[in-house]
Image: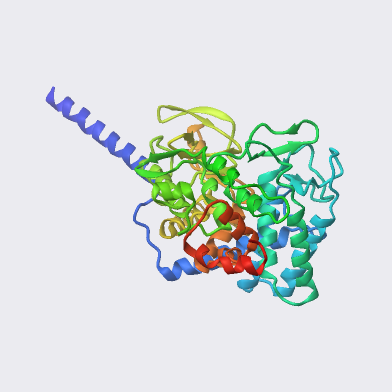
Amino acid sequence: MNRYVNIIIICFSFLFIAISCKHLAVESKPNVQYSQAEKQAFLDTLENRTFHYFWDLADPNTGLIPDRAPTKSFSSIAATGFGLTADVIGVKRGYVTRSQAANRVLKTLRFFWNAPMGPQASDVTGYHGFYYHFLDMSTGKRFKNVELSTIDTTWLLAGILVSRDYFDGSSPAEQQIRALADSINNRVDWKWFTKSDSLVSMGWHPESGFLNAEWKGYNEGSFLYVLALGSPTHPLGPVSWKKWTDGYDWASYYGYQAVQFGPLFGHQYSQMFVNYKGIQDAYMKNVGSDYFENSKRATLAQIDYAKHNPMHFAGYGANVWGLTACDGPANQTVTWSGNKIKFHTYTARGEAANYDNDDGTIAPTAAGGSIPFTPDQSITALMYMKDHYPGIWGKYGFKDSFNPTYPKATGGNGVWYDKDYLGIDQGPILIMAENYRSGMIWKLLEKDPVVIRGLKRSGFTGGWLKNATSTMQKANMN
């Protein structure tokens, strides 16, 4: 009898070992290390490939950037703003000449200045200085029935201000860039989009009017208010920033105290353009932090979430992490590791104390956009994902997303890979890699009078803003 008991015990032991080994096989290895030389070489390649998404795919007549590729798509005005920013990074890195980039930027700005504006539902590009979220790649007009978007206009304006600040030369092209950038920025009527409590609406449809949703509470929208308060023609008042911060949710997640927002893009987008390190508004002074530190903590919390991997998703670990808005494998509910998992196609994935949306889909842009906050962890994760998930890497760097769990959960094997690159992924990867390496975009906008005025009117003090007063005085912005 004891013999059979021992055999059973041995069998269960081998079964346990087999299951454990299978589980370990799909986790990322925790002790992968790359040398500094390897990391720098990788960043060189990453920036070069990512830059060429914008340079190669821009419409030759308008400069519009496609929302995604290789799937044929409309243009994203946010991605177009990132493309304008990419152009100046390309000059710095030697991918294109200054005159090549200036000509590309000038063509893009001419399109946006001359594009038709009006309240009608079709055959226009924008209204009151704002632009529609998506534009037809061939005509540059509103795509279907999308909204006039305040946040996507913000990212377009960010790229326009970067262009104005970078192209400071005396050539006719560079002078025209600065003049057009001023005209486009000055035309934006922030007050028209502010209907209640000094908060900006998220969008407007000619068919139905303003969206009920407003920009309140921590997310990617902080730069929207910096631009709105810094506008030289239609500025909002300081109460708008106070109303914005009234919606914050300060909490702890995986031991990190921070203002909460689940998808990592909300911690990254504004900080592509504003160096929040060492400057504080009233809210951050009160909690003893700043927005750079806040984003760092949010990123570290997501890394720890991936290490703990509470849903037992395949691959998660120290080198495979990053939840943000991205494509996914399917809209389907499946049982995985004893839990009902609702898989999604495109959704804003993320984890925070007040947010839970994870189906095992990893987006490399989440790690790429966090490079300045967590350089060692982010760069290592990107290199690991490139090496161990080869289907995510291609001509233009990282594709949007991958999911090692979904095929297994649905009776298959292998890894689900997205086939597309997304413009709003490529921007954070390229811009944040360059900010980490040289601070280029941060330094440009630290001298921008619109940004300086917006930050000061929002109550920011300290850090590099101490020396910014003279810049504002020279521009007659006080």
Q: Quadrant of residue 478?
A: bottom right
Q: Is residue 228 above or below residue 449?
A: above
Q: Quadrant of residue 61?
A: bottom right
Q: Residue furthest top?
A: 1
Nearer to the camera, 393 or 48: 48
Q: Is residue 91 above or below residue 330?
A: below
Q: Is residue 322 above or below residue 214?
A: below
Quadrant holding the N terminus:
top left
Q: Position of residue 316 (x, y in %)?
A: 42, 44
Q: Name the colour scheme.
A: rainbow
Q: How many marks?
A: 0
Q: Position of residue 65 (x, y in %)?
A: 72, 54
Is residue 211 visible in this depiction of the protein? Answer: yes
Q: Position of residue 298 (x, y in %)?
A: 44, 47
Is residue 320 visible in this depiction of the protein? Answer: no
Q: Position of residue 76 (x, y in %)?
A: 71, 49
**Left or right placement of residue 140 versus residue 320 in this view:** right
Q: Residue at x 75, y 38 (%)?
A: 146
Q: Residue furthest left?
A: 2
Nearer to the camera, 350 or 173: 173
**Left or right placement of residue 69 versus residue 248 in this view:** right
Q: Residue at x 84, y 37 (%)?
A: 121
**Left or right placement of residue 58 versus residue 91 in this view:** right
Q: Residue at x 62, y 65 (%)?
A: 472
Q: Quadrant of residue 158?
A: bottom right
Nearer to the camera, 471 or 142: 471
Q: Residue furthest bottom?
A: 170
